[in-house]
Image: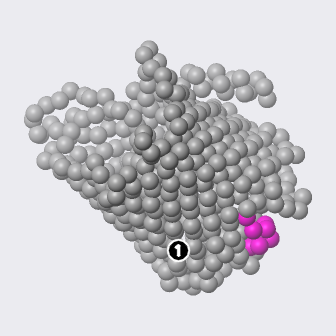
Amino acid sequence: MKKLFAAALLLCTTVSYAQHQELHEDPKLWGKSSKLLDSSNKNNGFKLGTIHGNLRSFFSSNFNKNSDIEYAQAVGGGIQFISKPVYHVKLGVSGFFVYDAFSSDLTMAHPLSGALNRYELGLFDITDPANKKRVNRIEELYLQYQKNKTTFTVGKQLLNTPFINLQDGRMRPTAAQGLWLQHKNKENKWYAGWLNKFSPRSTVAWYHTAESIGLYPVGVNMDGTKSGYKNALESSGAALVGAELNILKNHSIQVSNLWVQNIFNSSLMQLDKTPTTKHPYYYGLQLITQTVVNKGGNNDAAKTYFNPNQSSLVMGARLGKKLGAWDYSLNYTRITKKGRYLMPREWGRDPFYTFLMGERNEGVGGVSAYVLKAKYKAPKAPLTVQLGAGYFNLPDVTNYALNKYALPSYVQYNLDVRYVFAKHLKGWEAQLIYFYKDAMGNTYNNPKYYINKVDMGHLNFIVNFHF
């Protein structure tokens, strides 16, 4: 194992932008593009534009209690082309491939839990664990009209919103297809869209809205039986509208609403104070509500995604202070016992203040989460260090009505170190991630309640090269 780990580090330094972004940021996976030759001839406009390349290496290793170490080394690359605008219209296209350099056997279920690998398999194609060489997809393919501060995009694209977003980690993000309208100036941003297809993180194909829900593990119904909504839902698409407004001094207001036809509706309201030099303290308040639409996707309660008997309410708060190069915050999330907070994991990660990379609180209700975060940004070096420690108090794993994935209460510790190289190594970025989850709830000494869930450590080492 030591030899494999050393080989992974060596390989990481020879190939490959850390993927994590805040949810209010526009997608920035491709970095800055290199300009091609220009022309004033509009007939040649679509033949010219900007092009950008990315090589990426991702080593992942997982350490479960009473288990062998699991690992994978993924390498890949992609190209993005954006044409020169012609009458304010431009074409965008990008594609990416991933290759399994070496890994433990990701096709075998864990001998104790009977479940497939959770983290390393996600570097490739979760729908086909044996696929190691044909992990590629068209990621973007769109026409975009842009004039002044307004853009209208049609086609396959990358989005970053509270409910539908790139997600964290792995080799490539979640992408969406549809219509997207956005107006953004220095102070405010408005957006609205209709999405009818998704290509989730860790997959290679494009799926219609309903069939994209259930590609990831489905958990259990409220009575403890396995959820049956995979390939059983009906929905024509998802409508998403929202705004980020700076109408109060040093404050931002964020509102977002996701309506998934025939399944559910989620609404978010969030207020955040921005720290300043004179006033380094900041705070945030968050409210999320969810209700069912029709029967939640299927008339059969065993095959519905959002049970008609439940709704959910999430409340969040944060208090922080920027002190020199450091940024500290104390974060809190409460999901009430009204019901599980449900959001297709295929579409993005949690928008909670208490989110820590490596785990989610989607699928649970009756939760209280407390997280302390610290971020250090070196003043004279392109180095960022992020630390996190949190206690997540969840319902018992046998409380199926409020614990969809049978996740015990846990304490989690995170370390995230990032470095952006300069001068002769400009274009290179490196990231080291480590997290550990310690069980606080009862696992009943049953491996299915702790394998890949708690009493485990996880290591990532990522290198990107942009050109």
- Measured from the top left, where is residue 292 in percent x and y? 53, 79
State the image coordinates of residue 111 (x, y, percent, origin top left): 84, 51
Q: How many marks?
A: 1
Residue 308 is inside the magenta segment: no
From the image, tell me which residue sits under label 1.
290
Residue 140 vs 292, above or below: the answer is above
Q: Is residue 272 above or below residue 37?
A: below
Most extreme residue toward the front, as rendered?
278
Looking at the figure, which quarter contains the N terminus? top right
Identify the element where label 1 is drawn.
strand
Q: Quarter of the image containing the C terminus?
A: top left
Which residue is painted at 31% across and 59% down in the image?
247
Quarter of the view holding residue 345: bottom right
| Main secondary structure found in the magenta portion | loop
Measuring 11% from the left and 40% from the top, which residue is drawn there?
Answer: 43
Residue furthest out toward the left: 41
Residue visible at 36% across and 66% down in the picture: 241
The residue lying toward the viewer, choosing from 450 and 313, is 313
Magenta span: 394-400
Which one is in front, 327 or 42?
A: 327
Location of residue 48 (image quadrant): top left
Left/right of residue 241 with respect to residue 208 in the rendered view: left
User: From the viewer's perspective, is residue 307 above or below residue 390?
Assistant: below
Q: Amino acid at mark 1?
A: Gln
